[in-house]
Amino acid sequence: MPSIDTPTSAQPLVSLRDVQLTLGGNAILRGIDLEVQRGQAVSIIGPSGSGKSTILRCVTGLLRPQAGQIVLDGVEIRALKSEAQLAQLRQRVGFVFQQYNLFPHLTVLENLVMAPIRILGLDRASARSRALSLLERVRLAGKADAYPGELSGGQQQRVAIARALAMQPELILFDEVTSALDPEMVGEVLTVIRELVQDGMTCVLVTHEMRFAEEVSDQVYFIESGRVIEHGPAHHIFTEPDNERTRAFLNRALNGERATARNSFAPIDFKQLSFSV
């Protein structure tokens, strides 16, 4: 039976080789090759529907490819058959989703301590101490007793990040974590992720925030139609990509970001407004 306790070696923390996944007769992943070294930040970019989020779900075993190899620290994920083995794997991988997935009937603190107590076996005092420290880290020290419904979207997403960190993962996956946020809330979430990357946390980000991906990533993978079109160091991908399709996507995406930034701070021309009473 495969063991999750495989010793760490010089190999990548995460490795995908020729990963293929078909759902409902549709080919979603068509031979994905991808590597993540320890301490790296890797961004996966590409148009909507290209298979980016599917890759993250395959890494955690939430989706099972029909072909290919997915290895986490020497453990072949497709070889894990039991739910107990998969649960053990998921303890090592934090996953932050687009939707916050917080328990609305629990306070912020209770959302953070539940899994460490039930899954890791921490005593309540230790779990609480860890949770309070993480809330301070994500700038929510005063929100421990609040309920999710009392928080803004950006605050809820930061709680979700703290909850993932409470399990002390070796790897954390971010799946479009800013896409459901109002523009003014995006920055506070990206700041937390930026600090995690600076602290050496191994991160994989599926994101449409191109400037942020360029800033924080060691490696960038451009995915389209379930294939890796191009990958390399962030500076190379964003300044001189080799593939014409990559260049076209980035030009469109970066122009869109600039337009959004202009519109967010554009002054209001009151002469153009009409009022009725």
Image: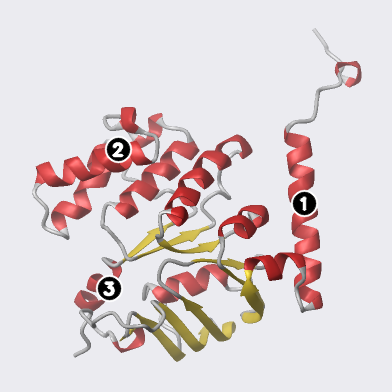
First reached walking from the N terminus: tag 2 or tag 3 = 3
Instruction: Judge the density around disc 2: few (<14), some (14-19), many (≥20) Cα neighbours within 10 Å.
Output: many
For label 3, the SS is helix
Left or right of residue 40: residue 30:
right
Instruction: Give how far across and how far down residue 216 sits, in percent.
Output: 56, 57
Left or right of residue 100: residue 90:
left
Q: Which amino acid type is shown beneath numbered disc 3? A: Leu
Q: Residue at x 20, y 84 (%)?
A: 3
* Front-lying residue, 263 or 38: 38
For label 2, the SS is helix
Q: Which residue is mark 3?
A: 89
Instruction: Give how far across and how far down residue 120 sits, in percent.
Output: 16, 59
For label 1, the SS is helix
* Front-lying residue, 103 or 68: 68
Say the numbered circle drawn on residue 108.
2
First reached walking from the N terminus: tag 1 or tag 3 = 3
Q: Which residue is mark 1?
A: 256
* Front-lying residue, 9 or 61: 9
First reached walking from the N terminus: tag 2 or tag 1 = 2
Q: Which amino acid type is shown beneath numbered disc 2? A: Val
CA distance for labels 2 and 3 = 25 Å
